[in-house]
Amino acid sequence: MKTHMFTLTVAALMQWPFLGFCFASDHLVTLKTDMATIDPKMPVYDCAPFQTKVKPCEPELLEAPLIEVPKNTINLSKGKPVTSSDDMPVIGDLELITDGKKVLGQEEQVELKEGLQWVQIDLGHECDINVIWVWHCFNVQQKICKIAFRDVVVQVSNNEKFDEAVSTVFNNDTDNSAKLGKGSDKAYIETRFGKPIVLGKPIKGRYVRLYSNGHDRSEANSYVEVEVFGSPSEPDKK
């Protein structure tokens, strides 16, 4: 029985209609989740044409990617508690990051203070994680005002403090300015389709931590939603 494995990058999206895991094809299904929308009350600001300082930068996603995952994959993070290096966000409450509502709006986003910051999701128990899908804030004028966040690092661990046994699944900090190790992933342009990080094989962990360090147009760190997909690890399955 043949197996297939793909690593999700924007370049790969242009070559492969489906992306998935190293599992038998008859055990896979297409991952279904809503894409972000824009609150019509969201103000529109003038801005200069986009010239990213974060290089190299992938082209933006123009449509929702099709991702194949094991049949038992669920959204593990919906409604789960979120903590942060900034426990008093400038805008919004941390619980908005996992509330299941992907709306770019004044009352539906979370903005953390300037500098390197992280948010952390507690899944409640160890899980087999397949996909981490991140929606940072994007711009209402998507065709002109594009955004690329700096030092995006995503890690998984069973250790709440992330001081040991940490798996880094995405890192576009190519100069190690965040002091978390030099990354080899490319920066990417934020869109309503988010950034799906597809793991080549499931990684076990209870906690998911996401770092960022502002973006090209602002020093703030902002999120619309984060979804962690996978299944409970074997000992926790009923």
Image (spheres, rainbow, N blue to C red):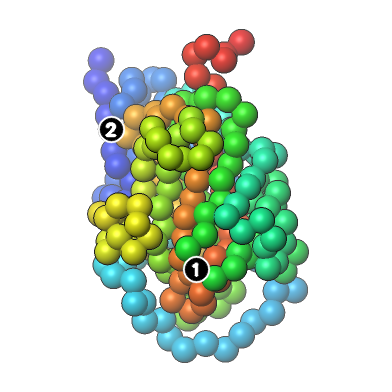
Q: Position of residue 29 (x, y in %)?
A: 46, 29
Considering the numbered disc 2 on the image, is that residue within a helix, a strand or a loop? loop
- Regarding residue 77, the answer to whether it shows in the image is yes
Instruction: Please state which of residues 173 and 55 is positioned toward the viewer in this rendering.
Output: 173
Considering the numbered disc 1 on the image, is that residue within a helix, a strand or a loop? loop
The residue at 68%/53% (across/down) is 94
Sort mark 1 into few (<14), some (14-19) or many (20+) by Cα contacts within 10 Å.
Answer: few
Which residue does the numbered mark 2 point to in the structure image?
A: 5
Instruction: Please state which of residues 126 and 70 is positioned toward the viewer in this rendering.
Output: 126
Does residue 182 appear left or right of residue 162 in this picture?
Answer: left
The residue at 36%/48% (across/down) is 170
Q: Position of residue 165 (x, y in %)?
A: 38, 32
Instruction: Please state which of residues 11 and 148 is positioned toward the viewer in this rendering.
Output: 148
Asked which quadrant contains residue 151, the reply is bottom left
In this rendering, the count of numbered labels is: 2
Instruction: Please state which of residues 171 and 145 is positioned toward the viewer in this rendering.
Output: 171
Sort mark 2 into few (<14), some (14-19) or many (20+) by Cα contacts within 10 Å.
Answer: some
Which mark is first along the chain, 2 or 1? 2
Q: Quadrant of the N terminus?
A: top left
Q: Position of residue 213 (x, y in %)?
A: 46, 65
The residue at 44%/27% (across/down) is 204
The amino acid marked with disc number 1 is Gly
Residue 115 disc label: 1
Asked which quadrant contains residue 106, the reply is bottom right
Q: Position of residue 215 (x, y in %)?
A: 46, 71
Question: Against 45, is 54 above or below?
Answer: above
Question: Against 102, is 207 above or below?
Answer: above
